[in-house]
Image: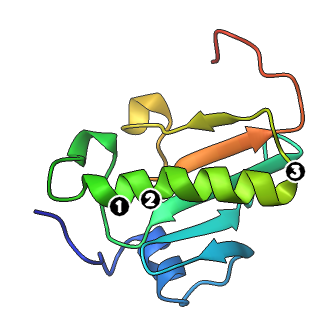
Amino acid sequence: MFQTQNPDCLFCKIVKGEIPSKIIYKDEKCVAFHDIDPQAPTHFLVIPKVHIGSCGEINGANSLVVSRCFEVIAKVTKELGVTDFRVVSNCGSQAGQSVPHLHFHVLAGRDMTWPPG
């Protein structure tokens, strides 16, 4: 099972409106907002409103909200006129996850090199 909200989580506080952010989309399951330290001309995050720690915590009970996150990514990129983009989710501190709440970075507007990092 998963927590609805974690009172100590930065992203849960954004969901509740306790911390202001530049929200570009929200619905009953997800929120999309601009990254505060953009790494590309277009850089926004999509998060589920429920607290899931990372991709490592996705399971049958919460996977539908993850699917919804990807629907939101498709919707927002279309609305922004973005056709080429990268979606990244860091899982754990060694992978660069700084907020322990599942989130997807959407980056666009510049060439993305491979391999990353």
The three-letter amino acid code for the residue at tag 2 is Arg
Q: CA distance from mark 3 to mark 2?
A: 20 Å
Instruction: Check contact, mark 2 vs mark 1: CB within 8 A.
Output: yes
**Which image quarter holds the C terminus?**
top right
Q: Earlier in the sequence, mark 3 or mark 2?
A: 2
**Which image quarter holds the N terminus?**
bottom left
Left or right: residue 58 compared with residue 68:
left
Mark 1 element type: helix
Left or right: residue 65 compared with residue 47:
left
Q: Say which mark, if any, is on residue 81.
A: 3
Where residue 10 appears, x then y in whole percent? 47, 71
Mark 2 element type: helix
Q: Can I make out residue 100 in this image?
A: no
Left or right: residue 34 compared with residue 115:
right
The three-letter amino acid code for the residue at tag 1 is Val
The three-letter amino acid code for the residue at tag 3 is Gly
> How many numbered marks, from 0 up?
3
Q: Earlier in the sequence, mark 3 or mark 1?
A: 1
Q: CA distance from mark 2 to mark 1?
A: 5 Å
Residue at the disc numbered 1 = 65
Q: CA distance from mark 3 to mark 1?
A: 24 Å
Q: Say which mark, if any, is on residue 3.
A: none
Residue at the disc numbered 2 = 68
